[in-house]
Image (cartoon, rainbow, N blue to C red):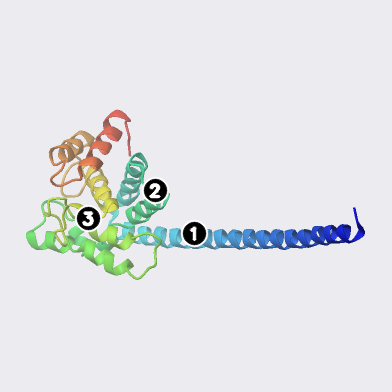
């Protein structure tokens, strides 16, 4: 090989090595940035979780008769979400919303929540405000999922007969349609000061009879399977 050609080749090798070093440094830099981003996301998620748990505890102090209601609803709702192949982010949104879905009850007089016997129409109307109140409480928190909207819609019904805005069908978020079923099942299965517990069988009958009218068809089907075939318990 002629000397000039060898010099050119050597120069190319050195240049490539230099570029390789720069590329590796850039790769390492990006990896470090991604790690920092993940750490920041994890810290933010932990902050959200701590805030949600604090809010949930506050609701429980206000309404001792449903102290575990939000946790039980959340457990069933997340089980249904996983069975329906919701994304990881969607399930996290369901979990956060489930844990504080009744936070609006902070604005309801305690004597209405714990009243034995039937509620008057005025008292019931006051309780029906809680989804809107809950939305107003958390709407300015920048959750990674539409937690405030899920809370607002968890008493809407697919035929438009729910509250507070009489939404129907696909106007209601999938997470809210799912949470609505979990909420009804847990409520009917548990004791309330104004009635005895109905039990799981009664709850299954309720969602089955109103499948496609009050409650989302797909959610009801999965919920019945989870409760009856997979023997889910609270």
Q: Earlier in the sequence, mark 2 or mark 3?
A: 2
Confirm or deny contact between disc 2 and disc 1 (CB under 8 A): no
Regarding residue 189, the answer to whether it shows in the image is no
Whole-angstrom CA distance, mark 2 to mark 3, is 18 Å
Instruction: Say whether disc 3 or disc 1 marks the residue closer to the N-terminus.
Output: 1
With 84 as the anchor, is 206 left or right in this view? left
Q: Quadrant of residue 197?
A: top left
Q: Secondary structure at mark 2?
A: loop
Q: Residues within 10 Å of mark 1 (few under 14, many from 20)?
A: few
2 vs 1, front mark? 2
> In the shown orientation, is residue 79 left or right of residue 189?
right
Question: Is residue 160 positioned above or below 227 on the image?
Answer: below
Q: CA distance from mark 2 to mark 1?
A: 19 Å
Residue at x 48% of width, y 62% of height: 47
Query: Which of the 4 image quarters holds residue 224?
Result: top left
Of helix, strand and loop, which one carries label 3?
loop
Q: Name the secondary structure under disc 1.
A: helix
**Residue at the farthest top position:** 229
Q: Nearer the viewer, mark 3 or mark 1?
A: 3
Give the class, few, some or many, for how many residues have Cα within 10 Å of label 3's Cα (few <14, many ≥20). many
Would you name the residue on which mark 3 appears? 172
* Res 178 seen here: yes
Q: Are marks 2 and 3 in contact (CB under 8 Å)?
A: no
Give the image quarter of residue 126: bottom left
Residue 210 x, y percent position in the rendering: 13, 42
Up-down relation of residue 213 to residue 11 (above or below): above
**Gap in Å between the C-alphas at discs 3 and 1?**
28 Å
The C terminus lies in quadrant: top left
Front one among 194 and 57: 57
Per the image, the residue denoted by label 2 is 87
Residue of label 1: 46
């Amino acid at each position: 090989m002629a000397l000039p050609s060898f010099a050119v080749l050597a120069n190319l090798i050195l240049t490539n090595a230099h570029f390789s070093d720069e590329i590796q440094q850039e790769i390492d830099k990006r990896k470090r940035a991604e790690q920092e981003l993940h750490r920041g996301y994890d810290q933010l998620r932990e902050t959200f979780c701590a805030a949600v748990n604090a809010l949930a505890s506050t609701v429980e102090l206000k309404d001792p008769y449903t102290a575990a209601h939000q946790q039980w609803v959340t457990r069933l709702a997340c089980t249904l979400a996983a069975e329906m192949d919701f994304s990881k982010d969607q399930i996290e949104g369901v979990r956060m919303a489930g844990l504080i879905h009744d936070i609006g009850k902070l604005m309801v007089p305690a004597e209405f929540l714990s009243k034995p016997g039937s509620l008057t129409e005025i008292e019931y109307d006051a309780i029906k405000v809680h989804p809107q109140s809950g939305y107003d409480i958390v709407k300015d928190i920048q959750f990674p999922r539409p937690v405030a909207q899920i809370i607002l819609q968890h008493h809407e019904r697919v035929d438009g007969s729910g509250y507070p805005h009489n939404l129907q069908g696909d106007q209601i978020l999938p997470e809210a349609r799912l949470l609505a079923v979990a909420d009804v099942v847990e409520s009917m299965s548990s004791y309330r000061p104004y009635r005895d517990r109905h039990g799981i069988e009664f709850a299954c009958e309720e969602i089955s009879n109103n499948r496609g009218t009050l409650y989302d068809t797909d959610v009801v089907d999965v919920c019945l399977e989870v409760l009856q075939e997979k023997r889910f318990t609270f």
